[in-house]
Amino acid sequence: METQAVAQALTPSARALYGPGPSNVAPSVVDVMTRSMHSHLDPDFHTVLTELVDMLRAVYRQEHGLVIPASFPGTSGMEAGLMSLVDPGETVVVATSGFFGDRIVQAAQRYGANVVEVRADHGDIVPNDQILDAVRRHPDTRLVGVVHAETSTGARHPVAELGAALRDHDAFLFVDCVTSLGGIELSPEEWGIDYAYSCSQKCLGAPPGMSPIAISERALEHARTKRVRPPYSFDLAELARYYVDRPVTYHHTVPVLQLYALHEALRLVLEEGLENRWQRHAEAGGYLQGQLRERGLHLLTDPDYQLPQLTAVRVPDGTDGAAVRQRLLREHGIEVGGPLGAGGPSIWRIGLMGVNATTASADHVLSAFDAVLDTAAASGR
């Protein structure tokens, strides 16, 4: 048998992650992952879990209901919510104007829900009046799904207003907060959100792999008693017995080092202060967007609904957007995103999230764009 060559030790190239996520992480978040790893059933680790849940409640600004840092990605956080709140055949109204709204549609359809789609063009939002009209036309609606911060376009949905309008309806308000948690104002309990799901790798500034979830008391009660129970891995009541209840009931072997990292990332968020963090993201994003406009570049999203932390820039006519992104990566060590999904406009997606939400990061990516676009223009591309 031929001897297998031994791979060299891993030494990834340095990257400035100015795309739609993941974002770079703070040195202390990396450092905590090198500490002594406890078992998932170690009582000292359960103290860490309790602190983590308490901090996550503070970041979500949710006192009641269930809040957990589920050890699966944001997409699984979405699926867990759909399976916990909806039975096959029930009606779900979903507002979509981008890739991740479409993902809610597709996941609900796979699960067997009767999905009513309310659509708008990429970069726009679906007006709340149209969502509410769809609910009125389908009085049996079980759930209304919407993306708070559409990562594929940089659009922010006015969720607080939608939640207020749905207060007297039995439908659950289900919200994708993947790119909003820790970056812009978000208050599920105050806004009437019944199920919010997010991820660890964007504005929170932790590595990928975790889905922070917040679910209201009324939605949690429904999840416990609904006709079709979700799969064991996504059963929120079972997960609560591990993350929240004491003594712990074993559910699965959680990624301990990932939870260490999320613990430190949340600690940094609260140390900075939520309002201060939102302001930092607003200032960095506003500065970047102003500088892009000064350069004659056009943004995709209506300014009234523009996210600060994620900016979609239209690729100029005659420019090879993918080639520009490749040069940014290879010549400058900078990652930015491109269009996501079929049928959308040609765009670059620039993210300034977590530790990258600074005007210095904005200047870094702007300088690289200046260099690459000047060369592209000179070469006729």
Image: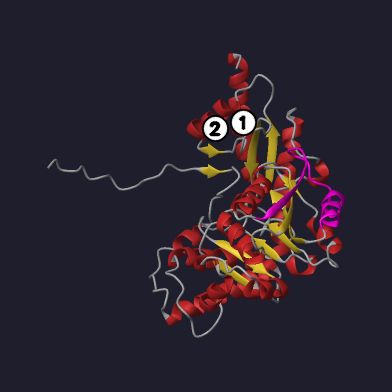
Q: Secondary structure at mark 1?
A: helix
Give the magenta range. 113-138
Q: Name above or below for residue 5 compared with residue 74.
A: above
Q: 270 or 210, which is in the foreground?
A: 210
164 left or right, relative to 220: right
Residue 298 placement: quadrant: top right
Residue 290 placement: quadrant: top right
Residue 47: image x %, image y %?
A: 50, 80
Residue sitting at x 73%, y 57%? 91
> Do the residues under discs 1 and 2 have CB atoms within 8 angstroms?
yes
Q: 28 or 317, which is in the foreground?
A: 317
Residue 229 among those drawn in magenta: no
Count of numbered labels shown in the rendering: 2
Q: 87 or 80, which is in the foreground?
A: 87
Q: Name above or below for residue 153 compared with residue 280.
A: above
The residue indicated by pointer 2 is 328
Image quadrant occupied by the N terminus: top left
Q: Secondary structure at mark 2?
A: helix
The residue indicated by pointer 1 is 369
Q: 64 or 375, which is in the foreground?
A: 64
256 left or right, relative to 306: left
